[in-house]
Amino acid sequence: MSVPATVALRRQGAPDLLVGYAHALAALPIGPDARRIRRNAARRLLEIHPQLAAWMRRPTPARLADLNRTGAWQFVAWCFTEGHLVPDLDLLLAKNPGGLYRQWRARHPGDVQRVTEVAERFGWSANWTRDVSRGGLALICLTAGKTLDQLDDGDFAGFAQALAEAPSAGHHTWVHNSSRVFSLHQACYELRICQQPPRMARPGKATIAQRVQTISQPGIRTAALRYLTTVAATLRPATVDLRADSLIVFTEYLAAAHPQVRSLTRLTRAHVEGFLAHNHKRPWRGRVARDQPVSPVVSKRTVIDLRCFFDDLALWGWAERPPRRLLFPTDIPRLDKPLPRAPAPRRRP
């Protein structure tokens, strides 16, 4: 962007942030059309949300929708690297960072080089060195709002907590980011930036939002999250976890057998009858996975949880509920009752 155009922005009363962004675009090796597109995208976002600090407090899905609608991610990334905004971890995990990490590395080449030198002494692979010294370093410095020398042990503890609580952090994301930040913490301890040797993080208890991320149907996932959050106010945490497991089992069956069903309003009795047959002989899953049918107790609990889910949605009048009743008392599996032990024969006197 030319200098006269920057002056024109000031004359138009454009926000200082937009003028500063336009000035930064002028230094990039891109054409005038690309500069205009990026500048207009930034203007659209600022027109909708003049106070970006307040915009950063919006839920992550809402911010992603704003970025998709305005095309202003490059502008927001520039605000992050320049320190005008401090990003939260959930947004960075949910949004492909694109050139954000590259921009941060360009402004902090010395920090990247120091971590790279430690990695070489440790004998890390080239790929892991790049991942830790670039992506990992940029991620924690951006979310902490600090440079390498300003980091401390508390920043790493805070990152671990934020990662455990981030709705956008699935299991794979948690494992990958925990590993590279652990390695970065090692490097910071070696550089005497941090005072405590790092400890490998252990996976914390998943939140309800994290649990329902495994539900592939968007409509059902939204209803399940709202439902589980509601009943969590009155049920014990262990009961809520079991109910979440039951809903996940049901949606996994739907995804495999009826992929066209994406919301509860499309459920029919035939779908439920198919699940009842599947649930009776389905194998164990999760940490206890084995090629054997689940116990009758587990099978029964799953059906009871699913019936509670449907009945509660109907009772509360939620719009997401199935169109008619789908589960009945006769659908609940009955447990075999052992015969009473025969009395011992009486001894004759």
Image (spheres, rainbow, N blue to C red):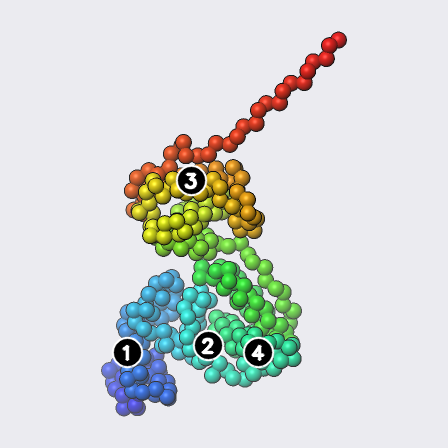
**Can you tell which of label 1 and label 2 is closer to the viewer?**
2
Which dot, 3 or 4, sits closer to the camera?
A: 3
Secondary structure, mark 2, is helix
Seen at 26% across and 81% down, the residue is: 13
Tell me the CA gap for discs 3 and 4: 51 Å
Label 4 belongs to which residue?
126
Judging from the image, what secondary structure is the residue with disc 1 in? Answer: helix
User: Mark 2 or 3, which is nearer the eye?
Assistant: 3
Quadrant into which the N terminus falls:
bottom left
Report how far apart the C-alphas of labels 2 and 3 lie in the structure. Answer: 49 Å
Q: Amino acid at mark 4?
A: Ala
Disc 1 + disc 3, Cβ < 8 Å:
no
Image x and y of residue 38, in percent: 31, 79
Q: Is residue 94 above or below residue 274?
A: below
Q: Which residue is mark 2?
A: 101
Looking at the rendering, in which quadrant would you find the C terminus? top right
Q: Amino acid at mark 3?
A: Leu
Q: Is residue 345 left or right of residue 108?
A: right
Q: At label 1, which amino acid type do we have?
A: Asn
Mark closest to the chain's N terminus, 3 or 4: 4
Question: Which kind of residue does numbered mark 2 sit on?
Answer: Tyr
| Position of residue 113 in the picture relative to residue 43 (left or right) | right
Residue under the point 47% across and 47% down = 245
Give the Cα distance between marks 2 and 4.
18 Å
